[in-house]
Amino acid sequence: MSRTGALSADPEAGSAEARASRSERGRLAIATAPLLAALTALFVVFLTGFDQRSAMPPDVAARFYGFFLDRYPLFVFALVYGLTRILTVMLAPGSALLVRRVVGGGIGLALFLAVSLHPTFGGLVLRAGFATGSGAFLNGTPMVIAYAMGAGAAAGLFGLAMGLGARLAGRPGPARSGSRWRRAGRALLGWIAGFLALWFAAAVIGLARDAGFGPWPRRPLDARDLVVAALVLTLAALPHGLLVAARLRPQRTTRATPQAARVGLA
């Protein structure tokens, strides 16, 4: 290979490496942003000493506090996770038009909040999980299986609202390469993997009290509660975060570019 060829190839190689590095950092940022937002919200609650004695409008307090918040307190931070996931899709680079991002993302956020907070905290998500699990247990199903059924019902509604919100905000669908059946198979596998990841997350979050998380919001968080909640949230979100990162990985191609071919043959 001549010196001129080497000089012309090095800048292009460096530029390709820089683009790959930026792409990798962007992929990791998109995948980790929801968990980081949830942990940040947890830390803010700890620093401010926020609990149910803090001043809040009566209507908001009546909708927010109650059975489901006492039983599933970490769902507050799961809401932050889901909202950040939709917002991240809205703000991330992509082919979706700005109008679709703003309008679709706004509709997706409203839908997600409605499913999670109407008529009161927990919305249809926790009500579906609690009704499914308690109904199964009362009908003689073993506790472990009934709990898994309830977590699956809650995860299904949560994932449906969050996934639909992300699609409305501009998240691209499955790659359009391959046959129709292959595309359908990839889409089905993606849905199953996403559901399993969120099912695991719902099951872990529901065990926060059993893991030692204190009686927040009836009293402020202490340092032990902070550590327990951070570990539970991280463990719960890890499978879904890894799945998002894997979906964002650029597809490799076996076709060499003309410049690469010239460099290889020189």
Image (tube, rainbow, N blue to C red):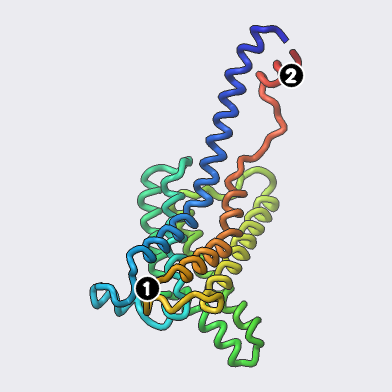
* Number of residues whose C-alpha sits closer than 10 Å to that of mark 1, classed few (under 14), some (14–19) or many (20 or more): many
Q: Quadrant of residue 65?
A: bottom left
Looking at the image, is 113 positioned above or below residue 2? below
Q: Is residue 19 left or right of residue 85?
A: right
Which of the two marks, 1 or 2, is nearer to us in this view?
A: 1
Q: Using the image, tell me which numbered label, if any, was put on residue 220.
A: 1
Label 1: which secondary element: loop
Q: Is residue 25 left or right of residue 5?
A: left
Give the percent coordinates (x, y) of residue 45. 37, 65
Q: Is residue 210 left or right of residue 117?
A: right
Q: Amino acid at mark 2?
A: Gly
Residue displayed at 52% across by 48% down = 172
Q: Is residue 6 left or right of residue 18?
A: right
Is tag 1's residue or tag 2's residue first in the polypeptide sequence?
Answer: 1
Residue displayed at 36% across by 52% down = 103
Q: Work out which quarter of the rendered image holds the N terminus and state it.
A: top right
Nearer to me, 172 or 260: 260
Residue displayed at 67% across by 37% down = 252
Q: Amino acid at mark 1?
A: Pro
